[in-house]
Amino acid sequence: MKLEGRLTLLFDDAGMEITIEDELSSTSFVKARLDAKATCQVLSRLACVNCELDVQGLDHIGKRMEHKSFEFEIPHPGYSMNKDDICTLALSVCPAGWESDLYFGSQNSFFERDGKEFARMRIRRWVSVE
């Protein structure tokens, strides 16, 4: 499988971090952490240098990310607006196959329509490319 990707190299006092991202899915799926010694070895063209790897999101690789706004009603007036309660409610109403970012910090996250209170969030899913 050939993919278009993006590579990021970040240096700091402790060494270097390399991040690989799949451009299509916008998923960073590999992070390699090298200490100062390993960083010097890599930069001097030594092969097979040991590093610490963090691998995640492999199920999104090669898929296209779709995202949209999703609105849901807050069940009754005076509903507790603390973050945990809103996140629990959001997860229970999120459509199947979609993931929520669970961010409610923007100005338009909460609004009123027809005398009812609503919340708005971004949801996303990854779909196979034909």
Image (cartoon, helix red, strand yellow):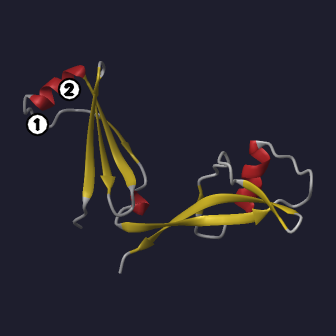
Local packing at callout 2 (Cα closer than 10 Å; few below 14, some 14-19, many 20+) is some
Q: Residue furthest bottom?
A: 130
Q: Residue furthest left?
A: 45
Question: Which of the two residues, 48 or 96, is positioned nearer the viewer here?
Answer: 96
Q: Earlier in the sequence, mark 1 or mark 2?
A: 2
- The image quarter containing residue 51 is top left
| Picture quarter with the C terminus | bottom left
- The image quarter containing residue 25 is bottom left
Please state the horizontal and vertical placement of residue 19, each as a whole percent of the image: 31, 43
Q: Mark on residue 55?
A: none
Please tell me whether mark 1 sits on a helix, a strand or a loop: loop
Please state the horizontal and vertical placement of residue 65, each as a whole percent of the image: 45, 65
Q: Mark on residue 47?
A: 1
| Picture quarter with the N terminus | bottom left
Question: Which of the two residues, 54 or 72, is positioned nearer the viewer here?
Answer: 72
How many angstroms separate mark 1 from mark 2 (CA)?
10 Å
The reply, left or right, for residue 47 in relation to residue 113 is left
Q: Mark on residue 38?
A: 2
**Tag 1: residue type?**
Ala
Please tell me whether mark 2 sits on a helix, a strand or a loop: helix
What's the residue at 29%, 18% (across, down)? Answer: 13
What's the residue at 34%, 41% (across, down)? Answer: 31
What's the residue at 34%, 66% (across, down)? Answer: 62
| Depicted 29 relative to depicted 65: above or below | above
**Tag 2: residue type?**
Ala
The reply, left or right, for residue 62 in relation to residue 103 is left
Please tell me how many numbered marks the rendered image carries. Answer: 2
Q: Determine contact: label 1, label 2, CB under 8 Å.
A: no
| Depicted 16 relative to depicted 19: above or below | above
Please state the horizontal and vertical placement of residue 10, each as a whole percent of the image: 28, 33
- The image quarter containing residue 8 is top left
Question: Which of the two residues, 34 or 105, is positioned nearer the viewer here?
Answer: 105
